[in-house]
Amino acid sequence: MTQLAVHDPASGALIAQLAADDDAGVAAKAQGARAAQRAWARQPLAERKACIARFRAGVVRDLESLAVTMTRETGKPIRMSRNELNGLLPRIDFFLDAVDRSTADETVLDEGGLQERIEHVPLGVVANISAWNYPWFVGCNVILPALLTGNAVLYKPSEFASMTGLEIARLLHEAGVPRAVFVPLIGGGAVGEALLAQPVDGVFFTGSVATGRRIAQTVGSRFIRLQLELGGKDPSYVCEDADPQAAAGSLADGAMYNTGQSCCSVERIYVHERIHDAFVAAFVETVRGFKVGDPMSEETYIGAITRAAQLEVLEAQVADAKAKGGRLHLGGHRLPGPGNWFAPTVFSNVDHTMALMRDESFGPLIGIQRVAGDEEAIGLMNDSCYGLTAGVYTPNRQRAERLLSQLRAGSLYWNCCDRVSARLPWSGFGDSGVGLTLSTYGIQAFTRPRAWHLRSAC
Ligand code: NAD
């Protein structure tokens, strides 16, 4: 049987060999899901909700061991693993609370013997191909509303978070979701490709633009629901009336949290020239204070880089910025020893000729660019193929809203960053993807609205 080797990115050590799926296994599981989906959809919603409520209780019960598993396989600092699991609970509560109103039948006309009604039917069997950076968040954003609305889910966790993927499956099965209704598939890109070859009714993907593009090409001609949650190069602008110290504290966290490996990490910062130097000094001091080290340590803020290949991307961006005149304040290199480590890195004096201001870094690396005013800042923030999130720091709400409304981004932040809410839609413009998760729209995404035209007499 094929195996998937799991390595601890903090030490390089082999920590598990998981049984992986092959093409025949993927096909058999897809057939099983097809056969099981109807009965699952026929169950009353209250019963499906009860399963997800029991799943929630399992997460609470096992939280510490789940956090340790996630930290061991991704290098995420243990406190952040706990934060992710604790942050998942209100998301589950939102789904449980909102699913009834999001999918209830709606009568939109009822007069003269004619009724028009909208019904939400499940898509059927959906494929979820997922990323490793927030495996509980990005997995459950798809899995939970899909199951609640009566779909079967074929779930391929990232090969860098498959132990967590199997834990999600264990807890869902223990909670009463049939094994054929929620099906984990273990392996790398080849297993993802085998999954896409199955006759599924929807594909929900979280990951890189390159893979998203391949998936769109593979399934685009099949006319099935396709959602792609992709990368970002998220900008923030600090106005001259902002408190440089407070903005630096907030943005340093937004740039470096999860070792910079968040789709909505702050990846570009523009600062008004009047407070630029004070901001950079405060930013560098904040980042200098971030403890780098053993992800299992309670004090650690910067952990390991999950995918070794990303180290080369970071090194290339640093070399490019240096060659083009960027000023390096901190870091700029790998850290010695086994495992995948990169020092938190801060550049100023950067511009848009540099890769670190254009391409996703997905690591603890940030560029800070001086701007003369609002107009220049808006132009630079919109100068990107991505459009996931964008933020403005100023005490003036009117000014913030005026600036934010001009930005091409799915989420807009005033005096905050790197924030996701289950109540709000999560989506991107441009290369950040198509479709959305979260909010009531992110529940309806797993259904097909069906139109009923009912005449009491012809
Ligand atoms: P990735 O594209 O390398 O892998 C994502 C998934 O796709 C994995 O499960 C992988 O096995 C699978 N895969 C790879 N090749 C495939 C193929 N040919 N066919 C089918 N499946 C295939 O991305 P990653 O490194 O796991 O994730 C990091 C990226 O995800 C970053 O760009 C980040 O910004 C993005 N991301 C976006 C969001 C969002 O909400 N927009 C959230 C988290 C991460």
Image (spheres, helix red, strand yellow):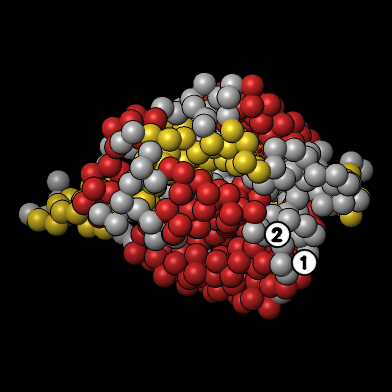
Residue plotted at (66% across, 43% down): 330
Residue plotted at (64% across, 21% down): 323
Q: Between residues 180 and 390, which one lies in front from this camera angle? A: 390
Residue 455 percent across, percent down from the top left: 18, 50
Q: Between residues 204 and 197, which one lies in front from this camera angle? A: 204
- For the residue marked with disc 2, what is the amino acid? Lys
Quarter of the image containing the N terminus?
top right
Q: Residues within 10 Å of mark 1 (few under 14, many from 20)?
A: some
Residue on which the image places disc 1: 297
Nearest to the eye among marks 2 and 1: give it.
2
Residue 307 percent across, percent down from the top left: 75, 41
Residue plotted at (68% across, 26% down): 319
Residue 202 sits above or below residue 324 on the image: below
Residue plotted at (57% across, 40% down): 366
Mark 1 falls on what kind of element? loop
- Corner quadrant of residue 191: top right
- Corner quadrant of residue 370: top left
- For the residue marked with disc 1, what is the amino acid? Ser
Residue on which the image places disc 2: 291
